[in-house]
Amino acid sequence: MTADPDPNPSSPAPVEGLVIRIDSKRCHVEIGDEVLLLSPRGKLFAGRGRIKNPIAVGDRVRVTLDGEGGGSIEEVLPRHSQLARASAGEGKMLQVLVANLDQALVVSSIEEPEFRPQLVDRILAGCEHEEIGAVIVINKVDLGHGGLADERVQTWQTFYEKLGYEVLAVSAESGLGVDVLHAHLAEKLTVFCGLSGVGKSSLLNAIQPGLALAVGEVSEKWKEGRHTTTHSSLLRLDNGGHVVDTPGIRNFGLFGREPREIAHLFVEMRPLISQCRFQDCLHTHEPRCAVKQALGQGDITQQRYDSYLELLADAEKGRL
């Protein structure tokens, strides 16, 4: 006798996928060779507190499929890293830009728009907090009158290399340094972040022309780029790497950091903190402050100290 079919067959076994893009509340999830558009379960948004987005590009997720090309995201698997900032506006929530990344490429241009060290320092501080390796990429070096010999390129390259950061001088237009940049991306998940108009998408097109990413012009009036990348998207490269092209970042505020933590995010200040007279020293006005002494001796530059003060002010404001 043939057994009757089970009237309540068990649910399909969950499978794992990779979030490669998020549109509103639906996610593009790569599962094997397919990309499916799936919705997260409402439980993922419950009790999220001050986290703006419970799912980010780069997340590994567990999903259930309905057999008809759809399904739902049931769980976000633990992350080994994330690059996050205070959300735009009041900065009252944590916005995760990319999850599970191996490195961040902080992309700036030497002109159009001009190099902005304060933004670079803010992103570097975010990388230091998450222990994410950071590489500074200076694009559009061909716009300088002397190319690589341009004094500004050399100045900023030397400046950050002395701090221990790798700096690549490149040009998406001429192809200068693109091969070196391509090699840095092999077998890694990398985020490209920086202002609009610095050439993030142009560099990715130069690295792998088949990506055909949209690029925009720099505003003649404001000397800033217009957003052409409107969503963070994870792209697969032919060298085994993955890159995330993010929308332009005009500001990068740290979220939930205590004022005393900020100096630890500046590599040149970190070894000096224990030498200050007071354990709760904020390195602004306190006597016998090792950081202020190093500033006076030129071992810490005024540029970096000013960046520190900006982030410190943000942290103190966040406690109000």
Image (spheres, rainbow, N blue to C red):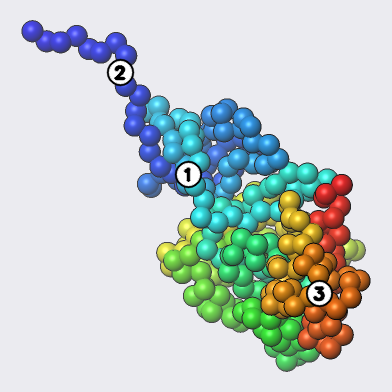
Which of the 4 quarters of the picture holds residue 176? bottom right
Residue 112 in the image, given as x and y percentages of width and height: 80, 71
Which of the numbered marks, if any, corresponds to residue 77? Answer: 1
Frontmost of labels 3 and 2 is 3
How far is disc 3 from disc 2 in space, using C-alphas? 69 Å
- 146 shown above or below 215: below
What residue would you read off at disc 2? 9
C-alpha span from label 2 to label 1: 26 Å
Q: Is residue 144 left or right of residue 82?
A: right
Lower position in the chain sequence, tag 3 or tag 2: 2
Asked if the residue under mark 3 is in contact with the one under mark 1, i.e. CB atoms within 8 Å, the reply is no
Q: CA distance from mark 1 to mark 3?
A: 43 Å
Residue 285 in view: yes
Could you tell me residue 298's position as x and y percent?
82, 87
Q: Earlier in the sequence, mark 1 or mark 3?
A: 1
Name the residue carrying label 3.
277
Question: Which kind of residue does numbered mark 1 sit on?
Answer: Leu
Residue type of the residue flagged with mark 3: Arg
Residue appearing at x 50%, y 41% in the figure:
76
Please state, as top left, top right, bottom left or bottom right, where the N terminus lies in the image: top left
Please tell me which residue is depicted at 67% across the width and 83% down the height of the picture. Answer: 161
At mark 1, the secondary structure is loop
Q: Nearer the viewer, mark 1 or mark 3?
A: 3
Q: Dot 3, crowdedness within 10 Å: few (<14), some or many (≥20)?
A: few
Q: Residue at x 77, y 67 (%)?
A: 279
Which callout, 2 or 1, points at the residue further toward the start of the chain?
Answer: 2
As shown in the figure, which amino acid type bears the numbered disc 2? Pro
In the image, what residue occupies the spot 44% across and 35% down?
63
Q: Could you say which disc has been placed on residue 62 in the image? A: none
